[in-house]
Every structure is written in structure tokens, then in C-alpha cells.
Amino acid sequence: MNKLLFFALGTMLWSTSTVLAQSEGLTSSPYSLYGLGVINQASIGRTNGMGYSGIGLRSETEINNLNPANFALTPPNSFFYDIGIIGKYNSYSNSINEETKSTVNFSNLSLAFRIAERLGAGIALTPYSDVGYSLVGVNTNIEGSEESFESNINGIGGLSDFKLNLGYGLTDYLRLGASFSVLFGNIEEEEYFYLDSSAFSAEEDTNYSGGRFGLGMQLDLGKKVTLGSTVQFPTSLKGSLRRSVVKSIDGVEITVEDEESDSVDDFKLPLEFGLGLSAKILKSFTLNADYKKNFWDNTEQEEHLGVYQDQDIYAMGLEFVRNPTSYKYAQRIRYRAGFNYDTGYLNINNTKIEGYNITAGIGVPIGRGNNSMLNLSYSYGASGQIQNVLVKENYHTLTLNFSLEDLWFKKRVIN
């Protein structure tokens, strides 16, 4: 009964987070104006404090959502949960002014469990992309005249990723995995302006949905080193658009347009390849190094002011724990640090929107006799630059993950 109540609570928390995401938005980045918005790099629990690295990380005590092959290591009778909360403080600046904004929301709901010998599975619901921008005083010329008008544009929304992971151990040293994602969500944009004695409001609601397939592998090179790789195959997300235009004259609203349209183009996601290495050093340290290549050039997509180009992501992470099985509480605490550099996938005015993150984290054990952990991670990052129409973005991110283990179907030794 306690398990069912816990699962119901987690589901309720995620439902609440979805409502909050639709009303407030998970980002306020001006670069979320393009495409599907800002693509999420944050993962689950442990890896957030390690530079978002972990493709080769061998983890038997927590969920590693970065490589489906790792789910083969889920212990018998163990059921893992991970519920996350994320807060972000952003500051933006250009050649004219500077502004700040902060957001808080739930970040993920994830499960992992054993199916059979050498076979494990996981389910995760995470944000894939976030949209939350506001443009004030956009100047537009009136067609056929020399006059112009100013409008305000707001955008909100994003896509969610519902993913099923399967991992199977071919041998004690080689694990293979597969993942299937259902991506879905909507992006709402509202533009309003005044012209003479009239007011105009235009709303566009674009819905995207589609599936995506991926593979993963982990190979233990001895007892201390693990090599991992992942691939996400290209796919196209189907889009549908609903547009509504309302005109107001002397307080009287007139609907100019309100219709469904299928004219929106499909959005293409690229082939993504990842390679990772994880090594245990001096008994107490774990070092991760990841490289990812996303082949955006092959999608041949363009925006109004930019084009999509191939993206490279480099990530490194380090974790220290003195003795994870010690009876002394202080020796079981985990300390983490990492770095992540992203060359970006969007080129605006011949300038790539690159960024980086410096991360730190701590894992605090919860109780004794299980692998439950409270993971707290901090990240400082920056992207873009002050040049022409570009904006420099600096942000502080704080994530809190309840990474919990429940033991199922375990026989009692003493009645």
C-alpha cells in the first residue's frame, strides 16, 4: 500500500508541475524564440552535479538516464524512484540594458525496476525543451506605406519527453540498451499592438508530437573502467497550428480569424551520437568524460535569422565518496563537480550560440540499509554574447532530486 501511495504522490507532483510549466514557463531565455525552444541538458540526480556526464557511468544504486544499457544493472527486488525540482535565476544583457528573471518548477519523474535476470527497465518523464520569451517594442513597417507600429510578443510552452528504457546484460561485462521516446507539447505565441484607435491581438498555438528510437551500450574494461556509447536516430515531429486574430474597436471585439491550419512544417531532430568513459580512481573517486555530436546540418532547417549547424558537447565530471558502505554517515556523503561546454546548434548572423556550465553537487544518504539519496546540484552557466542583435545570458541553476530505493518482494529473515 505504501508503494502505491508513493507512486500516486509522484504522479500527482508531476501533474502539478505540468500545469505550472504551462502557466509560468521553465525558461526565460530569449534564445527559446527559435525552433522548439531551449533544449534541456539536465538529467537525473547524480549526473547533474557531474557536468551532465554519465554515458559510461556504471551505476547500480541510482538511475542513470543517460544510457539505456545501464538499466541492466538494476538489482533484484529494487525499485528506484527519482523526483526532481529545478530553480533557475537568469540575467540577460545587450548593448542597451539588462534584466533578470527566476523560475521554479518540477523537473522529472523517473522509475527503474528489474524485469528478469540481466534485464532491467526504466520510465522517465522529463522536459525536452522549454519556451519562455518576451519581446517588447518590436517595430514593424506597414505594407504599402512608410508608417510603422510597435508590438509586444510573448511565447511560452515547450515539449515533454516520455521515455521507456530497456537494458540487457549479454555478459557480466557487456550491456546493451534501447530507448523509445514519445515527444509532445505545444508552443503558444501571442502578439498584440495598437494602431490609431484599434487594438489587435494575434495568438498562435503550435502542437508538436512524434516518436524517437535510441540505442546504448556499456562495456566494462576491467573492474574500474567502463566505456559507453549512445545513438539517437533522426526523426520528424508532426506539427499543427491554430491561429486566432482579434480586433478591438472602441471596446468592441471582432474575431478576424479563428481556424485550424496544417501549414506548419515538421520539425526535424538530428542523428545524435554519444561516447563516454568512466573510471574509478584511488578507490574514492569516479571520473566521467563524455562527448556528443548532434548532426543538425543534415536537417537542412533554417530560422528567420539563423540556421541550424552541427553541435558538439564536451562534458566532464568527478565524484568523491570516502566509503559508500561505511557505518559512519559522513563517509557515505558524495561530493561532485563537473564542467560542460556546448558549441551550440544555432547560428545567428554568422555567430554560433555557444555556452558552458560549471557544476557542483552533493549526495546525502537517506536512512540505512538502502540506496536512497538526496541529491543537490548547483550550476553556473552562460551562453550567447553581446554583439549585434545577440544577447548575453548568465544563469544559476539549482536542482534537488529525491533519488529513492524501495525493496520489493524481499523475504523476511525473521517473522
Image: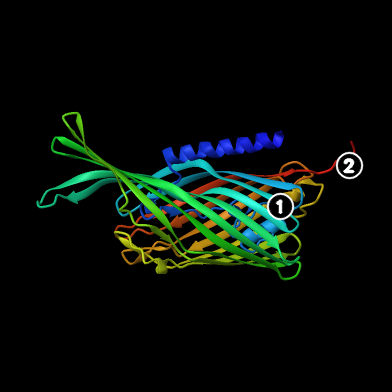
Q: Nearest the camera: 88 or 124?
A: 124
Tag nearer the camera, 2 or 1: 1
Where residue 47 sits, quadrant-wise, is bottom right
Q: Identify the secondary structure beneath mark 2.
A: loop
Q: Mark 2 points at which residue?
A: 413
Amino acid type, callout 2: Val
Q: Name the residue under label 1.
A: 115
Residue most extreme to the left? 145
Quarter of the rendering occupied by the C terminus: top right
Instruction: Please report the residue visible at 39 percent of the width from the left and 58 percent of the height from the top.
Output: 267
Q: How many neighbours does mark 2 have within 10 angstroms: few (below 14), some (14-19), or many (20 or more)?
A: few
Instruction: Please report the residue visible at 40 percent of the width from the left and 46 percent of the height from the top.
Output: 186
Whether label 2 touches label 1, CB < 8 Å: no
Quarter of the rendering occupied by the N terminus: top right
Residue most extreme to the right? 414
Q: Identify the secondary structure beneath mark 1.
A: strand
